[in-house]
Image: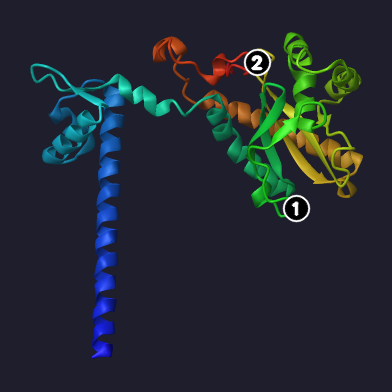
């Protein structure tokens, strides 16, 4: 009796798992179809049922069901006189979370991953945030030579860290003056002698007193307007990298910076504030954020 109950329980669990997989696959298929319909309407504008059918190949009852769901959620509007369907303004909200930092992360990920695959050392991309730099992408977790498990979202000193120093050295003069206004006089006096040095050599270096065992160097990702969109840098054990090797790594970083810019130029242009509504304020409108004007 006990063995039979156990077999029945196992059978029930298998059937339950199979039902779960079928429901999951059905939900995934529905999502794919809904997204395909949104993409078709995004490319072609208002569409009738037959147009969507011709574009996607989906059965018309399926399309009607998808459109009803999208309409109930406010993403699609039915036009009068059987003129079809069009996207509503609510679809713009889907991109609210995709801002300048998102674009930089997307553009930086592949080049920085490739850099770490070549050089083995962990690399990172950081952006300015008021009076600090913030790491927005890092290969620390995939590098075999990492000294810590992660640096994602870490706030870095603008005065003592390589990313902050690279930003200060290569940003426009008026932007640097604005940043100095947020620092005390001692901070400005401390960093100013390094700025010309970093500009001449093309890269910045971390203050050796910060973490004596490791070192970091960083270079800017420069807009054509001369503003710093981000900085990219690497961290390595100080005893493992000499001056010549450090200079070669900096050259590789500059090449990686150019790859990031090329990827940014290839991305679709983001909608302007006027196109998205004047009431919306995006990271690009902040005084500190570099506009992604790469073309």
Q: Is residue 121 left or right of residue 266?
A: right
Placement of 81 over or under 40, stated as above or below: above
Q: Earlier in the sequence, mark 2 or mark 1?
A: 1
Furthest residue toward left? 81
Image spot of residue 152 (x, y percent): 64, 41
The numbered dot on residue 173 is none
Q: Residues within 10 Å of mark 2 (few under 14, many from 20)?
A: few
Q: Quadrant of residue 227?
A: top right
- Callout 2–callout 1 Cβ contact below 8 Å: no
In the image, is residue 141 above or below residue 203? below
- In the rendered image, the quadrant that contains the N terminus is bottom left
Name the residue nearer the viewer: 156 or 88: 156
| Scheme by which the image is coloured | rainbow
The residue that appears at 58% across and 19% down in the rendered structure is 292
Q: Position of residue 250 (x, y in %)?
A: 79, 34
Separation of marks 2 and 1 at Cα, in angstroms? 34 Å
Instruction: Tell me the quadrant of the picture where the C terminus can be found.
Output: top right
Residue at the farthest bottom position: 1
Number of the front mark, 2 or 1: 1
Q: Quadrant of residue 262?
A: top right
- The residue indicated by pointer 2 is 224
Q: Is residue 133 above or below residue 144?
A: above
Q: Which residue is mark 1?
A: 145
């Amino acid at each position: 009796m006990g063995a039979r109950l156990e077999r029945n329980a196992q059978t029930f669990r298998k059937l339950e798992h199979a039902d779960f997989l079928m429901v999951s696959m059905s939900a995934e298929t529905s999502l794919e179809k809904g997204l395909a319909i949104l993409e078709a309407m995004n490319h072609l504008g208002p569409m009738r049922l037959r147009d969507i059918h011709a574009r996607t190949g989906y059965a018309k009852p399926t399309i009607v069901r998808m459109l009803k769901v999208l309409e109930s959620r406010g993403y699609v509007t039915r036009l009068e006189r059987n003129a079809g369907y069009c996207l509503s303004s609510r679809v713009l909200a889907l991109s609210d979370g995709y801002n300048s930092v998102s674009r930089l992360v997307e553009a930086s990920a592949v080049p920085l991953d490739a850099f770490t695959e070549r050089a083995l050392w962990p690399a990172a991309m950081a952006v300015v945030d008021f009076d600090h730099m913030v790491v927005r992408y890092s290969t620390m977790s995939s590098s075999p030579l990492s000294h810590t498990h992660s640096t994602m979202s870490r706030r870095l000193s603008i005065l003592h860290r390589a990313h902050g120093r690279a930003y200060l050295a290569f940003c426009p003069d008026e932007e640097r003056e604005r940043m100095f206004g947020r620092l005390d006089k001692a901070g400005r006096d401390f960093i100013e002698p390094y700025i010309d040095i970093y500009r001449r050599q093309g890269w910045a270096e971390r203050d050796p007193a910060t973490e004596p065992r490791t070192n970091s160097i960083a270079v800017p990702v420069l807009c054509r307007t001369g503003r710093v969109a981000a900085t990219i840098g690497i961290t390595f054990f100080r005893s493992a990298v000499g001056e010549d090797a450090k200079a070669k790594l900096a050259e590789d970083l500059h090449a990686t910076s150019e790859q990031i810019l090329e990827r940014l130029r290839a991305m679709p242009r983001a909608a302007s504030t006027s196109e998205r509504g004047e009431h919306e304020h995006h990271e690009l409108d902040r005084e500190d954020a570099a506009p992604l004007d790469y073309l």
